[in-house]
């Protein structure tokens, strides 16, 4: 009997990388850029105080304590360097790329469209297709135009209609592409903006939390309709942050709490939106051991940001999502690893476990690694390094990390060496 030495993936499997506009493009004026301008010094102090609790502290200290780290500014200048960056994607042997279109760039003032920006996005899509890289486009990835923020952002129901209008405009202009994601991680956004208060508009308000969550559900439905109106053959998805809640030792009380947590965090939004979805996108990053009796120590390795790395959890979140009977994409999966000493292991183990879910019946159409480049990690600024390419903060030069060679090999052969 011969031993299996490789895992084969289906023909046409999408191997991709993922990014978002605000995190890489540069030169965008929106609610986030306004917030950073006011908050960057406080952010540097906050993380300076957390100091040694940050696993990558010694290595990243010089960046963590620097207020400029928390200002996106020209970012990694992707808006000007996109041709070069697309070549990097091609050189990784990818056949897919997930990115986002920035509302604030396309509609900088209410009803005033920036046609040049739209032209550039159309040109970018055409270039990707020329390179044999199929685009998946996100329409909202956490940021809002300043004029929308001033109307109350997602707290105001009118934002849903204005978002749908933006979506119709964009999808109508980008008819040559069919894979659309309406919202990125609505559950993370409402938590960070209205519970933990780490993100703008920095509130701790449960009424607003539920209001915004419900408005985002409606926004998804309206956007989904707008996409289909503009392009009837388009496929609509969402990028959900799903977590593996693992009941400690399968004790009954732990199972109960883990079950509730999965329902609320992983499925609540999908329960309301799955009829307006053609596919489910899963962003898998987190694993939580649920133990109601005492605190359980994490035994898995950690990322530079302190999240536990549990690649086996991807199996569970994918299997959980199969209940909707829709195809699944892993729309994000990745880690902050400045030294690049965990990334290859993490990619490999994630793919082994994804493959196992596929063997057990999950219809998974593709995997998009987060991220192509080191980029602006929201309230943590530039210090977490998620890139398959390292970006020099002074010259903005891109340099491929060794783990990227491994991923490129998987994509080239459509197989995973064991
Ligand atoms: C988000 C990205 C973010 C990544 C890494 C995801 O939650 O969609 O914007 O950079 O995780 O933290």
Image (cartoon, helix red, strand yellow):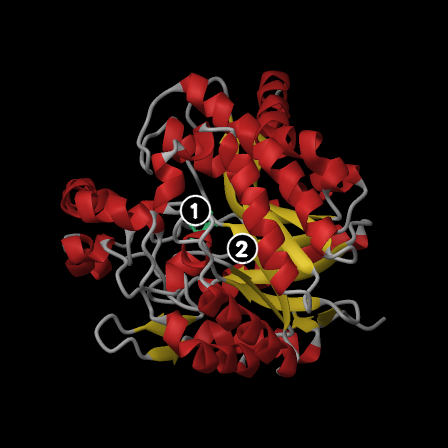
Residue 326, given in percent of the width and then of the height, sits at 78, 46
Q: Residue 93 lies in what quarter of the image?
A: bottom right
Q: Residue 318 lies in what quarter of the image?
A: top right
Q: Residue at x 47, y 17 (%)?
A: 293
The reply, left or right, for residue 42 in relation to residue 315 is left
Residue 121, given in percent of the width and then of the height, sits at 52, 68
Between 258 and 417, the one lying in front of the other is 258
Label 1 Cα crowd, 10 Å radius (few <14 / some 14-19 / many 20+): few
**Above or below, comparing residue 64 to residue 114 in the picture:** above
Between 291 and 142, the one lying in front of the other is 142
Q: Residue at x 81, y 42 (%)?
A: 325
Query: What separation in Å lies between label 1 and label 2 (alpha carbons)?
Result: 34 Å
Q: Residue 50 lies in what quarter of the image?
A: top left
Q: Which label's residue is closer to the chain start, 1 or 2?
A: 1
Residue 285 in sight from this viewpoint: yes
Residue 305, given in percent of the width and then of the height, sits at 34, 49
**Above or below, comparing residue 127 to residue 101 in the picture:** below
Between 160 and 412, the one lying in front of the other is 160
Nearer mark to the viewer, of 1 and 2: 1
The reply, left or right, for residue 68 in relation to residue 130 is left
Q: Which residue is mark 2?
A: 333
The reply, left or right, for residue 232 in relation to residue 61 is right
Q: Residue at x 35, y 61 (%)?
A: 385
Q: Residue at x 46, y 33 (%)?
A: 154
């Amino acid at each position: 009997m011969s031993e299996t030495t490789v895992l084969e993936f289906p023909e046409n499997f999408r191997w991709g990388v993922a990014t978002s506009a605000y995190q890489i493009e540069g030169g965008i004026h929106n609610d986030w850029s306004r917030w950073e301008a006011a908050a960057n010094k406080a952010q540097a102090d906050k993380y300076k105080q957390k100091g040694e609790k940050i696993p990558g502290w010694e290595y990243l200290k010089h960046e963590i304590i620097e207020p400029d780290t928390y200002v996106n500014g020209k970012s990694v200048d992707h808006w000007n360097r996109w041709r070069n960056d697309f070549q990097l994607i091609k050189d990784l042997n990818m056949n897919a790329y997930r990115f986002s279109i920035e509302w604030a760039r396309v509609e900088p003032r209410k009803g005033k469209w920036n046609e040049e920006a739209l032209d550039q996005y159309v040109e970018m899509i055409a270039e990707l297709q020329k390179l044999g890289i199929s685009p998946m486009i996100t329409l909202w990835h956490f940021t809002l135009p300043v004029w929308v923020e001033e109307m109350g952002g997602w707290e105001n129901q009118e934002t849903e209609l204005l978002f749908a209008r933006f979506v119709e405009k964009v999808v109508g202009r980008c008819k040559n592409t069919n894979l659309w994601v309406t919202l990125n991680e609505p559950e993370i956004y409402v938590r960070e903006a209205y519970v933990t208060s780490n993100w703008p508009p920095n509130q701790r308000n449960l009424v607003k939390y539920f209001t915004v969550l419900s408005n985002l559900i409606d926004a998804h439905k309206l956007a989904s309709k707008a996409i289909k109106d503009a392009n009837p053959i388009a496929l609509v998805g969402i990028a959900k942050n799903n977590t593996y809640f693992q009941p400690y030792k399968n004790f009954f009380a732990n199972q109960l709490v883990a079950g509730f947590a999965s329902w609320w965090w992983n499925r609540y939004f999908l329960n309301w939106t799955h009829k307006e979805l053609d596919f489910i996108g899963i962003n898998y990053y987190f694993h939580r051991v649920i133990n109601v009796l005492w605190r359980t120590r994490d035994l898995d390795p950690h990322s530079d940001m302190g999240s536990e790395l549990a690649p086996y959890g991807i199996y569970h979140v994918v299997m959980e999502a199969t209940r909707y009977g829709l195809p699944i994409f892993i729309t994000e999966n990745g880690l902050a690893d400045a030294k690049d000493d965990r990334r290859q292991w993490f990619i490999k183990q994630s793919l082994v476990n994804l493959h196992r879910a596929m063997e057990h019946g999950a219809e998974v159409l593709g995997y998009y690694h987060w991220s192509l480049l080191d980029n602006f990690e929201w309230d943590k600024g530039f210090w977490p390094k998620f890139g398959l390419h390292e970006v020099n903060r002074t010259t903005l030069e891109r340099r491929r990390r060794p783990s990227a060679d491994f991923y490129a090999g998987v994509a080239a052969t459509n197989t995973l060496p064991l």
